[in-house]
Image: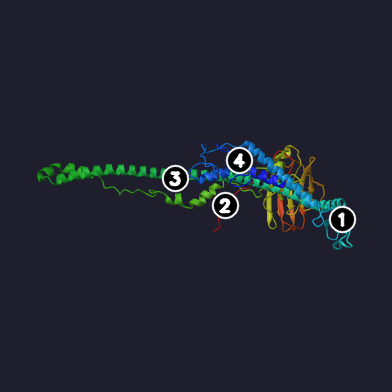
Amino acid sequence: MAAQANQAEMDFSCPICTEIFKNPVLLSCSHSFCKDCLLKWWSEKPYNECPLCKRRSSKSDPPCNLALKNLCEAFTQKLFLEETERSERSESLCSLHSEKLKLFCLDHMQPVCIVCRDSTVHANHSFRPIDEIAQDYKEWLRSTLKPLQDKLEHLNQFKVVWEKTAEHLITQAQTTERQIKEQFERLHQFLEEEEEARITALWEEGVQKNEMIKDKLDALNRETAALSDTVKATEEELRAEDISFLHNYKAAVDRVQQRPLLEEPQLGPGALIDVAKHLGNLTFNIWNKMKDIVSYTPVILDPNTAHPELIVSEDLTSVRCVKTEREKQLPKNPERFEHYTTVLGSEGFNSGIQTWDVELECVKTGTDWSVGVAAESVPRKGEILRGYWEIWFRGGKYTAYSPSVTDMVLSVTRPLQRIRMCLDWRRGKLSFSDPYTGTHIYTFKHTFTDKLFPYISTLSTVPLKIQTVNISTQLEM
């Protein structure tokens, strides 16, 4: 049988590489070769000839020998199955006694045959039937493998989350780049318009003052021409004979006296370009004027903390709730709230006095909302039991809420349209008031130890907005 197999293998072998044919091609002389082997052979020869009979081939790309290819693949599969079967048979027989392995030595932890059991090598050893011990060990290995399988599944989940995070990061970068460009475009436009306006004002002043000088020059030229005529005529009279001079003397005197000596002409102050007006404190004046197109918001919302159902505005100053499928699109990053529809401010406070207003446009909808501060340590994925101080609107009532103050209903006479928060971290005070009426609403007192972040929580589709503050300039001498 081995001889037959060897002969068959020879019949299915490429004459060039002596391996079983791979993608065999057929020449017109009826000889077959592996395609790659033949092409490589031809690349080293001056002519495309058969490696066996040296007959030239008329085709540079010979056709596939499909029948031989199928036979080689079937033969290869047969060899593989026979090798597998031989391997399995050898594994089931004892290498020392050629007996079937039916027992498992618990001391040596290896399969043995009946002859091995009675040998001195395994004297006084414990044995179990192969099928019994295999099942026991498989169960033990399954139980040992289970934590690794769970860990693998957990890691794959992390992989999915991180891949989604990477995609979201690119989207964030592209969106943020667009917004940066838009804001700089507005600034560029302002500066270009300001530059154009100032250059226009400069040249308008130049043209105006130039026209004034031209008018004065015209008048001066007329006066000079008239005076020149008088002088010339008088000088001619003076060069005349005495008799002629005396005959015209009276007329010459009248002509001279009609041209009284005038004061020296003056341009007067302000004839030149007021350079100081155009250049003095130019950058400061532009910056000061720029306050009209820029705004400052004391609290900027952090979209990375926003619950998936919240949408933060592009300028990061307002937030609204939308019931959508966004949760599937946003990564589950550790900063993001998942239990409450909440978003934090981007900056926390652990010193000083901070004040900010929230515009409550949702007051007409009567939807639940809350505003306040939360400690940096509050959980983002589960229930928050401590570390927050808030005014909560629910069911038409305003309530002060914190771990130490539970559902204290507040006396608010009219719906709040804006609420002001003032955090004095060092003194441990968080005050709420109505800036429209100046009415105090409630003050929490607590010894703060953590960094505190402003936050908004809402179920309203109408935005709650952090109010901007006016910018002023104060010069110190």
Label 4 to label 2, Cα distance in Å?
A: 87 Å
Inter-mark Cα distance, 3 to 2? 25 Å
Q: Which dot marks residue 24?
A: 4
How far is the residue under mark 1 from the one under mark 2? 101 Å
Query: How would you rate the neighbour count of disc 2 (Cα within 10 Å): few for under 14, some for 14-19, many for 20 or more?
Result: few
Q: Nearer the viewer, mark 1 or mark 3?
A: 1
Kind of residue at badge 1:
Ile
Looking at the rendered image, the disc whose residue lies closer to the viewer, 4 or 2, is: 4
Q: Which residue lies at the image location 77% right of the left edge and 55% below the top edge? A: 445
Viewer-nearest of labels 3 and 4? 4
Kindly state the secondary structure of the residue where label 3 is placed.
Answer: helix
User: Of helix, strand and loop, which one carries label 2?
Assistant: loop
Q: Residue 253's spot in the image, x, y percent?
A: 19, 44
Q: Quadrant of the C terminus?
A: bottom right
Badge 4 amino acid: Pro
The reply to whether dot 4 and dot 2 touch (C-beta < 8 Å) is: no
Q: Earlier in the sequence, mark 1 or mark 2?
A: 1
How far, Cα to Cα, is label 1 from label 3?
Answer: 109 Å
Task: Identify the amino acid type marked 2.
Answer: Thr
Numbered badge on residue 199: 3
Which residue is denoted by mark 2 in the rendering? 473
**Circle 1 SS class:** helix
Q: Earlier in the sequence, mark 3 or mark 2?
A: 3
Query: Is residue 214 positioned above or below 405 on the image?
Result: above
